[in-house]
Image (cartoon, grey):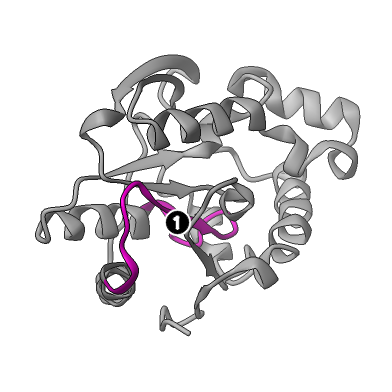
């Protein structure tokens, strides 16, 4: 997402290096890694560390933040969730999976691809065009990223929104205001994200150790 602020810590770097070694052991052409976890768990930070670290090995990895692919616009999403009922709509079906899978296919076939990019400052949705003929690897991150089709390595960050509560409360990255609606959204996302844990090939523990 455009304007997102990364808070990279030593734990992200250490876990990223361990994951990079796993990737190098199993690498193949047009390899796809997916990273899932709850809001505030460090998905974007870990994605950045892995992508940057792979450059040292001559691998050009492109992050794909699928939280850009919501089916409601940022400015309207909060009201829409509230009107429809948070427990009824927050979950897998909030993503535009057909568009996500189209981008995945474009990557696999080395084509140019257009995708949405949310500007967190204006909350508008811009368009980003990527030439995948020059990209070796895709790192997909998002709440439900490991549901994405064609993934080779699925990673699950085992941190809950309650364990990162201070991060949400202080909201140092300038994201949504924390109130009853936002906490209810996080609680529903928790249920949906936790259901994906059995799909994971690697687990990142609460202490950011790789299992």
Taking the image as shown, residue 181 lies to the left or right of residue 167, namely right
Viewer-nearest residue: 15 or 84: 15
Taking the image as shown, residue 114 lies to the left or right of residue 84, namely left
Q: Which residue is mark 1?
A: 43
Taking the image as shown, residue 196 lies to the left or right of residue 49, namely right
Number of other residues with Cα within 10 Å of mark 1, as a class: few under 14, some 14 to 19, many 20 or more: many
- Give the tally of numbered discs: 1
- Secondary structure beneath dot 1 equals helix
- Whether residue 134 appears in this view of the structure is yes
Magenta range is 25-44
Give percent across and percent down for residue 33.
43, 56
Residue 75, image quadrant? top right
**Residue 205 sits inside the magenta stretch:** no
- Residue at position x 69%, y 62% from top? 196
Viewer-nearest residue: 57 or 5: 57
Taking the image as shown, residue 38 lies to the left or right of residue 92, namely left
- Residue 71 vertical placement versus 25 (above, below): above
- Residue at position x 68%, y 24% from top? 71
- Residue at position x 56%, y 32% from top? 100
- Quadrant location of the N terminus in the rendered image: top left
Give percent across and percent down for residue 84.
89, 28
Give percent across and percent down for residue 91.
76, 44
Viewer-nearest residue: 9 or 67: 67
- Whether residue 96 appears in this view of the structure is no
Viewer-nearest residue: 142 or 119: 142
**Residue 36 sits inside the magenta stretch:** yes
Give percent across and percent down for residue 60.
20, 46
- Residue at position x 35%, y 60% from top? 46
- Residue 5 vertical placement versus 196 (above, below): above
């Amino acid at each position: 997402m455009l304007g997102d602020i990364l808070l990279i810590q030593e734990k992200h770097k250490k876990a990223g290096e361990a994951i990079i070694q796993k990737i190098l052991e199993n690498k193949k052409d047009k390899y796809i890694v997916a990273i899932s976890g709850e809001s505030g768990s460090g998905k974007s930070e870990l994605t950045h560390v892995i992508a940057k670290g792979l450059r040292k090995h001559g691998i050009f990895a492109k992050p794909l933040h699928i939280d850009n692919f919501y089916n409601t616009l940022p400015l309207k999403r909060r009201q829409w969730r509230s009107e429809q009922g948070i427990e009824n709509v927050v979950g897998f079906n909030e993503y535009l999976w057909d568009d996500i899978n189209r981008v995945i296919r474009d990557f696999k076939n080395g084509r140019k691809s257009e995708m949405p990019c949310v500007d967190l400052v204006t909350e508008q949705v811009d368009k980003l065009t990527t030439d995948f003929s020059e990209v070796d690897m895709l790192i997909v991150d998002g709440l439900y990223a490991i549901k994405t089709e064609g993934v080779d390595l699925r990673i699950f960050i085992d941190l809950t929104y309650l364990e990162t509560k201070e991060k949400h409360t202080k909201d140092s990255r300038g994201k949504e205001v924390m109130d009853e609606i936002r906490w209810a959204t996080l609680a529903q996302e928790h249920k949906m994200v936790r259901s994906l844990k059995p799909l994971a090939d690697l687990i990142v523990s609460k202490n950011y150790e790789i299992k």
